[in-house]
Image: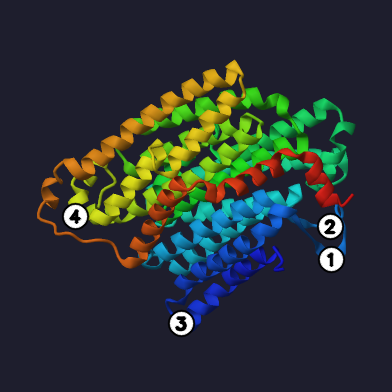
Amino acid sequence: MVSPILLIAVPLGLAFITPLLGLARKGAPRYVPAVAMLFNLLVSVSLLPDALRAPIVVRTAGWAPPFSIHLVAGPLGLLLSSLIALIGLLVAVYGMDYIREGATTRYHVLSILILVGATGVVLTGDVFNLFVFFEILCISSYALVAYWGDSASVEAGAKYLIQGAIGSSFVLIGIGLLYGAFGALSMADIAANVSSVSSFRLFVSLAFLITGFGVEAAVFPLNAWLPDAHSSAPSSISAILSGIAIKAGIYAVARVVYTIYGAQSILPFVALLSVATLLIGEMCAFSQNDIKRLLAYSSIGQMGLIVFGLAMASATGVSAALFVVISHALAKALLFLASGYMILRTGSREVSSLNGMGTRMPLTSLCFTVGAFSLVGLPPFVGFASKFMIVRAALETADTFFVVLLAIALIGTVIEGAYFLRIVQGLYFKPAPQQAREETRKEPPLSALVPVGVLAALIVAVGLYPGLVERALGAAANDLLDRDSYVQNVMGD
């Protein structure tokens, strides 16, 4: 069996040799991210069947936890690492022709590092390395948000850096408090001994960790950085930030709450925050005229829906939340990638500039429509299956609190449907702007059409056959909810 450590070591090694490849042959660096992510996708998928039977624990230097640095490749970690690699591979192919200006080698190195960081976050078994991998992800993101070098992107990168640095400081303080209380950094070891520490000390460290990771998770009121960052970054990076990076933040919050602390008592408050996040994100998206800012605010709304599922603390609720993670990653990556070449074609990010694009870029527009309808939750797309599971999970709780919150959350879905249908109507039923009416049909290059086509096909396929992922979702949910099994598998007793 291949070691899960290769999921980090191989892409990290490729990132370091990419500049050397660029010196040897100009243009070579643009292929490296695709190679790295193809490797990770194959390894993650090959390991997933074994992980569904029992988590794969990798210990360094033969030391047993809590003394070793270790990776825990369980169903949840490998499901998410497969998703990271899939989105990363498609974005890497897209970036081969999309990124032609600026420091292209640096772009490709940093894009690998974002994905390495996200992979490390979902696989690590100790809290300090959770912080380290988070920093790899975030620092690479700061630089790539400012990649174009214009005033708007530099300002967005600076805002992201400042707020991200504050969040990182909170995480580090929380980790320091944990180490002071337990003398260990292993999540399993801390979870096994959490009852031996006073509830006040636990609450303080939990508050610091949730606040710190909540910044990257874009949960209200910690999401002020996201609209500028996602709209100013290259569209390929916007796809990674929305499809992958903020999911890493959600994962970290969930792992801290469920595995380390078992802090289900705070979940009603988290559920309230999730619905507030959803409504604020969707209402802000509705008022936008900039397509990338609209998609960015839409991501905030979807994060609210994911956290709502996690807050139910049931196997169905967590499975539903993870299903939304998958459906949102596919759809939002598709929307950012499809709109990227539309923006290049029109020279504008205004929603009205996309009017008539259905005749000028029909295939791209069709794929965009698939992504939009999936996010709204229309059948037969994967977004419908994932949102239906959220509804089912809330009703299964038979808890008036969650049923009422579900009704409020569905208002957000109606708002989401309104602004996406407005965009799709413009694509097909509104005339193109005056200056574009003489343009002929012209699609993006194959390096862009293939990724958006694959994403659209996956959205339809998983929507029609949700059973393709249901077993993995159930196992991943149990991996997160069953603290005792996690401790036993990692500690080995």
Point out the tag, 3 or 4, that comes first from the N-terminus: 3
| Residue at 29% in and 36% down | 421
Which residue is under mark 3? 25
Q: Label 1 neighbourhood size at 10 Å, few (<14), some (14-19), many (20+)?
A: few
Q: Quadrant of residue 6?
A: bottom right
Q: Label 2 neighbourhood size at 10 Å, few (<14), some (14-19), many (20+)?
A: some
Front position among marks 2 and 4: 4
Amino acid beneath label 3: Arg
Amino acid beneath label 2: Ser
Q: How is the image coloured?
A: rainbow
Which residue is under mark 1? 61
Amino acid beneath label 4: Arg
Point out the tag, 2 or 4, that comes first from the N-terminus: 2
The reply to whether callout 3 and callout 4 are in contact (CB within 8 Å) is: no
State the image coordinates of residue 122 (x, y, percent, origin top left). 65, 51
**Rendered image: mark on residue 68:** 2
Relative to 490, 455 lies left or right: left
Point out the tag, 1 or 2, that comes first from the N-terminus: 1
**Rendered image: mark on residue 12:** none
- SS at circle 1: helix
Which residue is under mark 4? 360
Q: How many marks?
A: 4
Instruction: Give the spatial CA distance, label 2 vs label 4.
Output: 57 Å
Q: Label 4 neighbourhood size at 10 Å, few (<14), some (14-19), many (20+)?
A: many
